């Protein structure tokens, strides 16, 4: 009998190595990887494997990993939390750590996070803190987690006082990005991940930008290549600036200075992170046009707006979001600006960014006004 046809899109598994000396690891990107995950673990991590996931991903995907007969050697068991950003909490950290302790998971054991960035950040922090740090595997199941949060070792939880205020750098031993998992991802979540993809193109890779400007869907034949390109860009930046002390990693914040302020002003429920970043990138694109140190041609700013729209991302601020609250969240006043204020990432041309720029408060106000109009 003929063997089944390989995945029609691309059966090739791509591997990006994140070179961090003794902490180096592989990011595997491809199709059908979840059903082969037991092949990737030996030599990298040891039993038992505590799978941490959310209740949505548990049913769709994580149970498949736990129940595979070939996984039996790894003694897998699953710990499930509720889906959603609110789960990235100290309460859940405490519950999960206690579960590992009750099960007497040894230092040689492994935490495997299966889910989006919420699960990756929380499970990673569990792995970073349990017994002062045990092995961690990332299995990202959202586009955002594949191209961004699963690579680079930032883990943590939120506090009532703000997002990501507690955390640790804890690099995974392995990242397995199975593109087939995206089949069930809601389109709005896929689009939010595309905001980060467009960001990588804008700051580092004009060819990537040109490709994604045409719009990307989960079915596209070159999705693996697109994800690989993004992961490679992030890996190279993380390698040069593992702990975000040298400015290089700050480049990843293109669109994020204003994006974070929009998320805060809108109360974290109106927009997904990627949607707020989309609007923030439109603002940063026009600030790049107006700023004397970047002088981005207007046509390039318009191309960024068009790329966001082509990927079903918002570019105009919801009028219900208070613009004064955005400026307040930025601390956009003369006093803050005088001692440095916010540092912005702006672009000189598509594919080339500059970090650490200061922007005069009146220009920031102009940008917030600008994004309130349609593009
Ligand atoms: N560590 C980092 O470097 C880094 C970088 C960027 C973002 N983050 C963090 O990532 C988080 C956002 O991650 P996210 O956008 O992946 O959100 P998420 O983890 O909340 O996932 C989004 C939703 O999709 C569901 N889901 C996940 N995979 C699915 C699938 N394959 N099919 C169907 N549904 C699925 C989840 O249950 C959830 O409801 C934020 O907390 C952010 O702070 C971290
Ligand atoms: Zn982001």
Image (cartoon, rainbow, N blue to C red):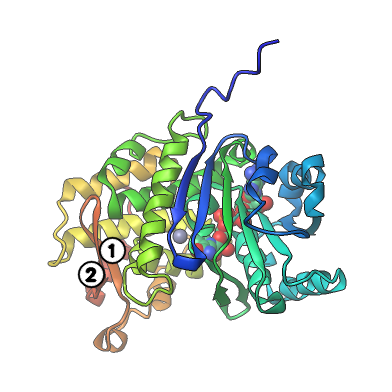
For residue 98, the mark is: none
Residue 85 visible somewhere in the drawing:
no
Label 1 close to label 2 by CB (< 8 Å): yes
Q: Give SS at disc 1.
A: helix
Q: Does the closest atom of ligand 2 sit within 8 Å of the Cβ of label 2? A: no
Residue at (50, 32) in percent of width and height = 12
Query: Which image quarter has ligand 1?
Result: bottom right
**Residue 364, located in which quarter of the rendered image?**
bottom left
Where does residue 112 sit, x and y in percent of width and height? 68, 58
Residue 159 or residue 252, whichever sits in front: 252
Residue 213 visible somewhere in the drawing:
yes
Residue at (54, 57) in percent of width and height = 150
Above or below, comparing residue 3 to residue 300 in the picture: above
Where does residue 155 sit, x and y in percent of width and height? 57, 69
Mark 1 Cα-neighbour bin, 10 Å: few <14, some 14–19, many ≥20: many
Q: Does the closest atom of ligand 2 sit within 8 Å of the Cβ of label 1? A: no
Mark 2 Cα-neighbour bin, 10 Å: few <14, some 14–19, many ≥20: some
Where does residue 372 sit, x and y in percent of width and height? 35, 57
Q: Which residue is mark 2?
A: 363
Q: Quadrant of the N terminus?
A: top right
Q: Give SS at disc 2.
A: helix
Calculate the distance from the C-alpha at mark 1 to the C-alpha at mark 2: 6 Å
**Residue 101, located in which quarter of the rendered image?**
bottom right
For residue 367, the mark is: 1
Where does residue 302 sit, x and y in percent of width and height? 24, 46
């Amino acid at each position: 009998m003929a063997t089944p046809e390989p995945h029609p899109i691309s059966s090739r598994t791509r591997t990006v190595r994140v070179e961090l000396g003794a902490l180096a690891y592989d990011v595997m990107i491809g199709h059908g990887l979840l059903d082969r995950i037991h092949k990737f673990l030996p030599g990298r991590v040891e039993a038992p494997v505590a799978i941490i996931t959310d209740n949505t991903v548990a049913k769709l995907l994580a149970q498949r990993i736990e129940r595979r007969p070939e996984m039996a050697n790894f003694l897998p068991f699953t710990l499930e939390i509720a889906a959603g950003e609110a789960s990235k909490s100290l309460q859940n950290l405490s519950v999960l750590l206690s579960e590992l302790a009750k099960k007497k998971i040894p230092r040689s054991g492994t935490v495997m996070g299966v889910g989006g960035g919420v699960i990756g950040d929380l499970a990673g922090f569990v792995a970073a803190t349990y017994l002062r740090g045990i092995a961690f595997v990332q299995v990202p199941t959202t586009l955002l987690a594949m191209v961004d949060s699963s690579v680079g070792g930032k883990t943590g939880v939120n506090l009532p006082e703000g997002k990501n205020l507690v955390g640790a750098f804890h690099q995974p031993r392995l990242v397995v990005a199975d593109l087939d998992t995206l089949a069930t991802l809601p389109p709005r979540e896929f689009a939010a991940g595309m905001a980060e993809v467009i960001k990588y193109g804008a700051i580092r890779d004009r060819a990537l930008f040109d490709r994604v400007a045409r719009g990307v869907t989960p079915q596209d034949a070159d999705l693996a290549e697109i994800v690989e390109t993004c992961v490679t860009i992030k890996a190279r930046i993380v390698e040069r600036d593992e702990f975000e002390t040298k400015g290089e990693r700050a480049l990843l914040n293109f669109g994020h200075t204003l994006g974070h302020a929009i998320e805060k002003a809108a109360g974290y429920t109106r927009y997904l992170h990627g949607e707020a970043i989309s609007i923030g990138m439109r603002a940063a694109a026009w600030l790049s046009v107006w700023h004397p140190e970047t002088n981005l041609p207007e046509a390039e700013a318009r191309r960024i707006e068009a790329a966001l729209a082509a990927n079903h991302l918002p570019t105009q601020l919801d009028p219900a979001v208070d613009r004064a609250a955005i400026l307040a969240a930025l601390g956009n006043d003369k006093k803050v600006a005088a001692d440095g204020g916010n540092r912005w990432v702006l672009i000189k041309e598509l594919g080339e960014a500059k970090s650490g720029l200061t922007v005069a408060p009146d220009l920031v106000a102009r940008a917030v006004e600008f994004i309130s109009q349609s593009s």
